[in-house]
């Protein structure tokens, strides 16, 4: 289609699961519960780590950043998604769609890099325990966290600005639950070939490369665990790493299928479900997988709870 100089579309329509109106009410209830549990679980982690000085070490400070990202990603996606499920026709302005896409990319990209740095942290701690205090000192930790956030900001700025530089002259229906890049770019009435090449390359660098590095780290960790003399130590370390790898695989696997798929790949409903897996399930599961099963986190939670009870009894 011939490109126009200016978009004639001033607002979009989020279609959501409009093809299945009989499921909208049930989905609304399920997603509302998931959203509330996600907020509570991640908020608990943020509060516990912030208040407990003994947890101010790289492993838990990485978890703190991950929970901030997960809460933020849920807050960007879930309220709009609930609105889509509760109304027959959800309009979203051009500016609001831009903002939502920007923050989805920002927090999603930051999480990609954070999960990579967390895997490196575990690799350094398990495979090189003697040099770990030097390898992961405060300065290195700050650099890795800043790199993750700055990279997420750069990815979001470049990609969102490029997407919304295209003209949109109709149709205006986004066949998705939110303004995600693959769904929005299909509505552009211009040649998007160069952008698709960029998006494919960017996805390889942002999602696939970190995921492969994480797998490599965990393979090294697995060999280190197998050399441990204590059976209990091996079981504990293996359980922790298996949980982390499950979360990582879920996030990177569904994110890569969403952003690497060709236009004629999966059906729109399948794309929505894959999007839900990394934007909904991983923020929900991360508190359980990374923290709430952790004995130190449990002890810190009980310590804070006893402190609160003592204050009320004074």
Image (cartoon, rainbow, N blue to C red):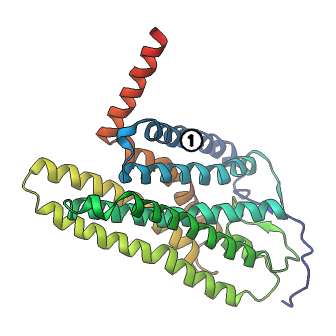
Does the image show residue 72? Answer: yes
Image height of 17 relative to 155, above or below: above
| Tag count | 1
Q: Nearer the viewer, residue 269 or 238?
A: 238
**Left or right of 38 in this view: 226:** left
Q: In which quarter of the image is the N terminus?
A: bottom right
Q: Residue at image x 66%, y 44%?
A: 28
Q: Residue at image x 49%, y 54%?
A: 282
Q: What element carries label 1?
A: helix
Q: Nearer the viewer, residue 147 or 63?
A: 147
Q: Residue at image x 17%, y 51%?
A: 235
Q: Residue at image x 70%, y 71%?
A: 183
Residue positioned most to the left? 229
Mark 1 sits on what residue? 39
Q: Residue 272 at x, y = what percent? A: 62, 62
Q: Nearer the viewer, residue 216 or 21?
A: 216
Kindly indicate the quadrant of the structure image that contains residue 260.
bottom right
Q: How crowded is mark 1: few (under 14 residues within 10 Å), some or many (20 or more)?
A: many
Residue positioned most to the top? 314
Q: Residue 284 at x, y = what percent? A: 50, 47
Q: Which of 31 and 245 is in front in this view?
A: 245
Kindly indicate the quadrant of the structure image that contains residue 245.
bottom left
**Left or right of 101 in this view: 68:** left
Q: Residue 196 at x, y = what percent? A: 65, 85
Q: Residue 193 at x, y = what percent? A: 69, 90
Does the image show residue 249? Answer: no
């Amino acid at each position: 289609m011939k490109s126009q100089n200016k978009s004639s579309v001033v607002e979009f329509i989020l279609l959501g699961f409009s093809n299945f109106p009989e499921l909208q009410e049930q989905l609304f209830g399920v997603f509302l519960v998931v959203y509330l549990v996600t907020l509570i679980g991640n908020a608990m982690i943020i509060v516990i780590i912030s208040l407990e000085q003994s947890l101010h070490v790289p492993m838990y400070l990485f978890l703190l950043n991950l929970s901030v990202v997960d809460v933020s990603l849920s807050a960007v996606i879930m309220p709009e998604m609930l609105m889509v499920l509760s109304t027959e026709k959800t309009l979203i302005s051009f500016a609001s769609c831009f903002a939502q896409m920007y923050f989805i990319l920002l927090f999603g990209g930051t999480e990609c890099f954070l999960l990579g740095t967390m895997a490196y942290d575990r690799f350094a701690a398990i495979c090189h325990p003697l040099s770990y205090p030097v390898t992961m000192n405060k300065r290195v930790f700050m650099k890795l966290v800043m790199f993750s956030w700055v990279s997420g900001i750069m990815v979001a700025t470049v990609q969102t600005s490029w997407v919304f530089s295209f003209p949109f002259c109709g149709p205006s229906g986004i066949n998705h639950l939110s303004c995600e890049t693959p769904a929005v770019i299909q509505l552009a009435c211009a040649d998007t070939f160069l952008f698709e090449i960029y998006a494919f390359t960017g996805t390889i660098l942002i999602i696939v490369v970190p995921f492969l590095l994480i797998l490599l780290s965990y393979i090294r960790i697995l060999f280190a665990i197998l050399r441990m003399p204590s059976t209990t130590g091996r079981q504990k370390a293996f359980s922790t790493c298996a949980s982390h790898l499950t979360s990582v695989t879920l996030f990177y696997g569904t994110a890569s299928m969403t952003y690497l798929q060709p236009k004629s790949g999966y059906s729109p409903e399948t794309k929505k479900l894959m999007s839900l897996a990394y934007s909904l399930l991983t923020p929900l599961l991360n508190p359980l997988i990374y923290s709430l099963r952790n004995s130190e986190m449990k002890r810190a939670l009980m310590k804070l709870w006893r402190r609160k009870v003592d204050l009320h009894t004074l």
